[in-house]
Image: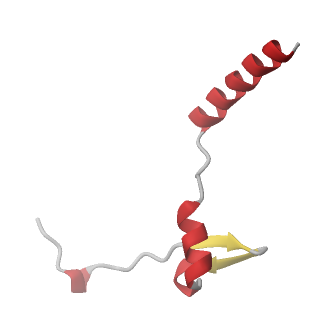
């Protein structure tokens, strides 16, 4: 089943920028490129970073 573009509801993306929650469609070019370069938090990445930190601390000791 295909959906016609006229029937779709647009999704608005918000992000916290400079302490305010704003829609990304209102960002200027520089702020939008910064938004696109951001890394999102995932628990899996957090756990592997923690293991890497422990490994580095053992080598430093």
Q: Quadrant of the C terminus?
A: top right
Residue 23 appearing in the image: no
51 vs 31: above or below: above
Query: Quadrant location of residue 26?
Result: bottom right
Q: Position of residue 58 (x, y in %)?
A: 81, 13
* Residue placed furthest toward the left: 1
Q: Quadrant of the N terminus?
A: bottom left
The residue at 28%/79% (across/down) is: 8
The residue at 69%/70% (across/down) is: 16
In the image, 38: left or right of 58? left
Of 26 and 60, nearer the camera is 60
32 vs 55: above or below: below
Q: Position of residue 48 (x, y in %)?
A: 62, 27
In the image, 7: left or right of 49? left
34 vs 27: above or below: above
The residue at 70%/73% (across/down) is: 17
Q: Position of residue 7 (x, y in %)?
A: 24, 82
The residue at 65%/35% (across/down) is: 46
* Residue placed furthest toward the right: 61
Of 18 and 5, nearer the camera is 18
Query: Quadrant location of residue 45?
Result: top right
Q: Position of residue 25 (x, y in %)?
A: 52, 83
Residue 45 appearing in the image: yes
Of 20 and 28, nearer the camera is 28
């Amino acid at each position: 089943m295909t959906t016609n573009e006229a029937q779709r509801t647009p999704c608005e993306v918000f992000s916290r920028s400079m302490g305010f929650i704003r829609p990304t469609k209102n960002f200027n070019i520089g702020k939008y490129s910064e938004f696109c370069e951001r890394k999102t938090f995932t628990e899996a990445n957090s756990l592997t970073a923690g293991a890497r930190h422990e490994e580095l601390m053992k080598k430093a000791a």
